[in-house]
Amino acid sequence: MSNFDAFHDFRMNNHVAIVTGGAQNIGEAIARTFSGAGAKVMIAGRNGEKAQKTAAAIQAATGNEVLGISCDVTVEADIQRCVQETVKAFGGISTLVNNVGWGKAYDDPLAVSEEEMIQSYKLNTLSAMRMTAACRPYLLKAENATITNSGSLVGVLPAFDFIAYSAAKAALNHLMLGLAHYFAKQVRINTVLIGTVITENYAAAGLDEKAQYALAHPDNLTGRAGKPQDIANAFLWLASPAGSWISGQTLQVSGGGKRVRLKPE
Ligand SMILES: NC(=O)c1ccc[n+]([C@@H]2O[C@H](COP(=O)([O-])OP(=O)(O)OC[C@H]3O[C@@H](n4cnc5c(N)ncnc54)[C@H](O)[C@@H]3O)[C@@H](O)[C@H]2O)c1
């Protein structure tokens, strides 16, 4: 019988996490995984009722405290309320997950309006900066303080069809690297470059798993599209003490796939 516990450093007891966009899909998997690892979790979602419902389901599954709150991460007052409620309920914040993000496809990248470019930047990039600013005083007091972001493969590879989203996700990488340098020795900051993960959104768009995989990842090395849990496992590594020597990094979790698409002939 071994005395060595290989999972010890992956446990998140004494951690308090905020997961934005944690009511469904990838964010939900991250919230459930952190909770299962022992953390107290606040799910911040635009739809407060859905956030609370997901929180209750996770708490029932893991036995650890999970709360849900309505918070639009593009609205400063909502961000402040979310942070204050988290501290009131759980006594601090050690772990921020900036997971909210969304992108729209366009046929002609140059037809995207200035307004749409700015909206994408506000949602995918600026929201993470504002959340970081609001959590800063608590992160600075916490042990193993981390910020981990839901980036995208299209933030490092060209994606003319998702031009507003990919430009904003590229900016997120750069922003967070700069902040990792600023918070050196105090808060570890990493970004996961997520490949195609099949969620209920794809089913709603009428694409089954096979169709989505074929469309986005013809060169995927693993032969399958991602699942939310594939991404949550990477977040657990980066945010738990197991990742304590990892900061200022982007980690590609995409089945080894790339996403390079050229304009059709
Ligand atoms: N699914 C993929 O294939 C994929 C690929 C690359 C990157 N990503 C990134 O991973 C993250 C999660 O993706 P997902 O597929 O789970 O997305 P999703 O749309 O299923 O979930 C996002 C959640 O964020 C919430 N949300 C949206 N805007 C919000 C706002 N302003 N304030 C608060 N909550 C808001 C939504 O209500 C939803 O619950 C996103 O950042 C996305 O860009 C996803």
Image: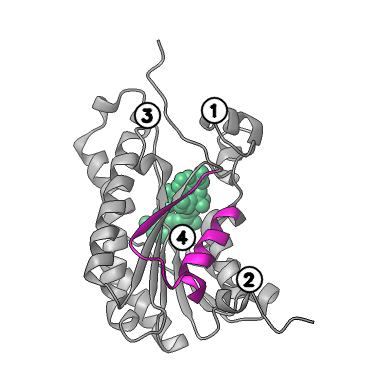
SS for callout 4 = loop
Q: Which of marks 2 and 1 is in front?
A: 1
Magenta highlight range: 230-254
Ligand 1 lies under 8 Å from the Cβ of mark 4: yes
Q: What's the amino acid at mark 4?
A: Gly
**Quadrant housing the C terminus:** top left
**Distance from the alpha carbon under mark 4 to that under mark 2:** 15 Å
Per the rendering, the mark at residue 58 is 2
Q: Position of residue 21 (x, y in %)?
A: 46, 60
Q: Nearer the viewer, mark 3 or mark 2?
A: 3
Q: Is residue 117 above or below residue 97?
A: above
- What residue did someone put label 4 on? 21
**Distance from the alpha carbon under mark 1 to that under mark 4:** 25 Å
Q: Where is residue 199 in the image (x, y as percent from the top left)?
A: 58, 46
Residue 249 belongs to magenta span: yes
Decide which of tag 1 and tag 4 comes sooner along the chain: 4
Ligand 1 lies under 8 Å from the Cβ of mark 2: no
Per the rendering, the mark at residue 215 is 1
- Front residue of this view, candidates 244 and 72: 244
Residue 236 belongs to magenta span: yes
- What residue did someone put label 3 on? 161
Decide which of tag 3 and tag 2 comes sooner along the chain: 2
